[in-house]
Image (tube, rainbow, N blue to C red):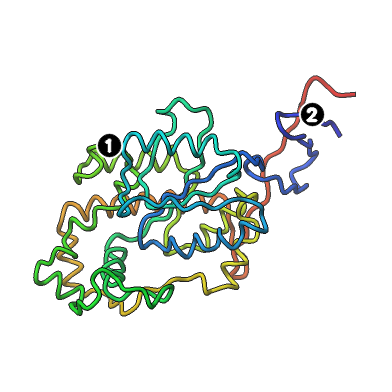
Amino acid sequence: RTIARHEVREVEQRQTRDVVRDWPALPESDDLVIIYNRVPKTASTSFTNIAYDLCGKNRFHVLHINTTKNNPVMSLQDQVRFVKNVTSWKEMKPGFYHGHVAYLDFTRFGVRGKPIYINVVRDPIERLVSYYYFLRFGDDYRPGLRRRKQGDKKTFDECVSSGGSDCAPEKLWLQIPFFCGHYSECNVGSRWALEQAKYNLVNEYLLVGVTEELEDFIMMLEAALPRFFRGATELYRTKKSHLRKTSEKKPPTKESTTKLQQSDIWKMENEFYEFALEQFQFVRAHGVREKDGELYVLAQNFFYEKIYPKVN
């Protein structure tokens, strides 16, 4: 067999496509940093808890980005500090950063290495309904914690019919700005923001999953980034305590849903969600197969040949 060194690892020449090697999709580098700029109420806590459970076994660090009042937009000076921390804090590498922070383009700051971005999105109305009841009744993750709207017994449907602010169409505008980034146009419900969010999703994120298919998202991350997520799929399947459920949540009526769907903001947020879903299903279709009702990750489907000059 001919062996050639290709950057950081040796690449084995395979004589046929039937030979399987479990090479990771990316180098298992200790310099690797992942940023999960999590959108609220998209199963982000459930997913993050898996990272916390795996960090000791897989030897990486998990850090929560705690912004004042959960403001997703950083000041310019904080952007500079954050980029410097992430890129130069060697003691925290490999690192998994998570927090409610809008996408930040590291190339604007003149740094060499860029982190790997991942995220999860959810049907916009389902996300808003979940957040509405979460503010009033909390969840089973920290049931004793007093929430901001605790004591308010008004249902989501009653809120919509009365024109309440907590269920207004403007409250749907959340996932687009998280992907759009730190620009003034990202927070005004504009078509520009939608297109920028789409661009960033395709070009700046390794993988964006959907809440409704979280297990598939985790499985694909384990295949692509085993340095962090080795064992994540089995952990998710067996340890259901990871799953966080909002208390007292009632599905909205068709009338409430129809009223929200008449707004331009819903139309843009839903367009973004469907775009993200289509991209995720495309990536999954090329990396995962189903057999006997079970999903499995495809083995490596490429190899190297005709390597010159020959090595004696």
Secondary structure beneath disc 1?
loop
Left or right position of 81 against 147: right
Looking at the rendered structure, the kind of residue marked 1 is Tyr
Image quadrant in which you'd find residue 23: top right
Position of residue 187 measured from the top left corner of the image (x, y, whole percent): 23, 44
First along the sequence among labels 1 and 2: 2
Residue occupying image coordinates x 60% and y 73%: 238
Q: CA distance from mark 1 to mark 2?
A: 46 Å
Look at the numbered discs 1 and 2 and tell me whether their residues touch, using CB distance below 8 Å.
Answer: no
Residue at which label 1 appears: 183
Residue occupying image coordinates x 14% and y 69%: 160
Label drawn at residue 4? 2
Q: Quadrant of the N terminus?
A: top right
Q: Is residue 110 above or below residue 216?
A: above
* Residue density around tag 1, few if under 14, some if 14–19, many if 20 or more, within 10 Å: few
**Mark closer to the observer (1, 2):** 1
Q: Residue furthest left?
A: 162
Looking at the rendered structure, the kind of residue marked 2 is Ala
